[in-house]
Structures are given as C-alpha cells and as structure tokens.
Image (cartoon, rainbow, N blue to C red):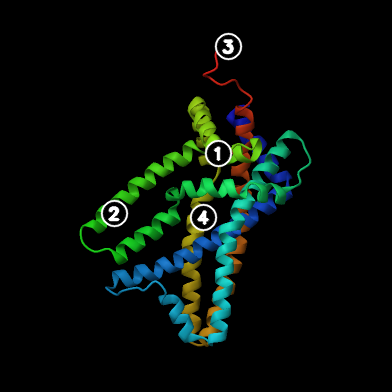
Amino acid sequence: MTPREIIAEAWSITTSQPRLRRWAFTASFFETLFDVKLLIYQFYFAWKYFHGGEAGFFDIEIMIYNAIPHGVFFGLLLGLIILIVVELFIPHVCMGAMIGLSAKAHRGDEVKGGLVLGLYNFFPIFAIHEFLILASFNTVTTTTSLILRYIDGPIKWYSIGVLLILFLFSTILRFLFSFANQGVVLEKLSIFTAMGKSLKLIVSHLSHIMFLLLLLFVISIRIVLNIATVVLVPAIVLGIGYLLAQVLSPVLSTAIAATIGVALIFGASYFFAYLHAFKHAVWTVTYLELIKQKDLDVIL
C-alpha cells in the first residue's frame, strides 16, 4: 500500500470502529488530565521562582489542607493518589487495545477483545515507554523545574543542557522504535526484539516512513490542539477559581473550578479520540504492510 492508501485505510478504520474510538477517548482523557495537573503545578512553581520566592514540593497540598476541612482534604488526597495510578496505568492498556483492534479491523476480523489485548500487553508497552522516558515532554519539564529550584550555581545550566541533549537523543530513539509496540502486540515479540525489528523497518523503509510522517503532519493537528488545551485548561481553571474565591468559600470555589476543568478536558478528549485512534491505526496498518515485504538484507 502507498502512504496515501495507508492514510485512507486508517481513517476508514477510525471512523467505522466505535470500540476503537472508545479506547482512544479513554486514553486521551487520562493523558490530558495528567498533563493539566502537571502544568498547574509547574505554573505555581514558575510563578514562585520568577518572583524570587521558594516553592516547596508540597506547597499546593499544604495550602489546600489549611483551606478546607481536614477530613475532606484526606479524601481528596486519597482520590488524587488513586487517579495518578489510574493515569499511569490506563493509557498503556488503551494503547495495546487500539493497536490490536486496528489490526483486526484491517484484516477484516471481528473487532473485539480490547481489554484482553490491553492487559496482556501492558507490561511490555509500559517497559518500552519507561525505556524512552526522557523523550517525554512532561519528564523534561518536571526535571527542568526541579533543577531550577533545587540546584544552585553554574552546574544548574550545565544540567539543563545535558537534559536537553538526552531529550533530543531519546526523541530520535523513539522515532526509530516507532514500531516496537506493534511488534509486541501483533507478533508477541520480546521488548528488545521488537525494538530491533522496529529499527530495521524504519531504516529499510525510511523514505516511505518520512512521506507517511509528512502526510500525518499535514492531516493531524493533534499536537497543536493538545498544547493549546493543556495550556488553556489550567489557565481557565485557575482564573475561575481565583474569581470565585473572591465571593465564595474556598471549598465551593475549588469544587466549581475543578468541575469546569474536568468538563473541558472531557470535551477536548472527545475530539482527541479520533486523532489518537487515527495515529495508532496508521502505524499499525503500516507495520502490517511492511512486514509482508522481503527484508532488504535477505538476498536468497
């Protein structure tokens, strides 16, 4: 299949498979929720840093503890801990489900079994993600924040420079290992075997992959939308919370602001679901098509 045919096939799968979109919506919702919470913390740390203050690691929790009844606080804290665990767990399960269901749809099989596919492949997908953890914008942002707040002297800027170099290197590795998750889910390869096969496929079909990436870049606006949402939602939530705090109690104003924030994330995730499912369908269909071809290093 040509890159254009792959794009068309992936979009057809995305629009015709509601089960695939449900998994994509779930992944998008929890990923966006996690990003928004992280950015709210970074907004606070940045505000304290640029105003010459010192930001403690648990300043926000202490402020909430002093503003609301202690019983309510500990209930919220327990809920937050559970939510963070879910946010780290669910997207990897959803990825396994989306890859498997996309492959089934492409092959004309019955599109079911997403939960089994997700749970069965959770650990290898999680391991691949952790192996490339420095390619994550969230990780780099959080680490940079920690360096700025807790390291003094010239070594601070050297550390940030090394971190950015590692980020660039890890981003290149993430591109080269783009098919590793598909290898794990579709062919039950071990983690490093899947990485090696992904590297070989990328290098062997680089022109094909680059043209496909160009089409994806033109068609998909997920990155721009995601950045806009992750930046705007915390700003809206903090702004509403601040205004409501002038006329309402801290508990009520926080609850209203949080509810509005979750509703905004819910709505944004609905649109992200299509793009999330589409992206995984593209890479899955591409992987299935490329492994049909003869390896370039095989002569006889």
User: Residue lying farthest top?
Assistant: 300
Q: Residues within 10 Å of mark 1 (few under 14, many from 20)?
A: many
Q: Which mark is residue 74?
A: none
Residue 161 in the image: above or below residue 174 = below
Q: Which residue bears the numbered disc 4?
A: 226
Q: Quadrant of the N terminus?
A: top right
Question: Mark 2: which amino acid?
Answer: Ser
Q: CA distance from mark 2 to mark 3?
A: 50 Å
Q: Which residue is mark 2?
A: 159
Nearer the observer, 231 or 84: 84
Q: Please name the residue that numbered disc 3 is placed on.
A: 300
**Disc with the residue nearer the chain's start (1 vs 3):** 1
The secondary structure type at the circle numbered 3 is: loop
Dot 3 or dot 4, earlier in sequence: 4
Q: CA distance from mark 3 to mark 4?
A: 47 Å
Work out how far the residue at label 1 is from the one at label 4, CA to CA, in angstroms.
24 Å
Residue 201, position as x, y percentages in the image: 53, 29
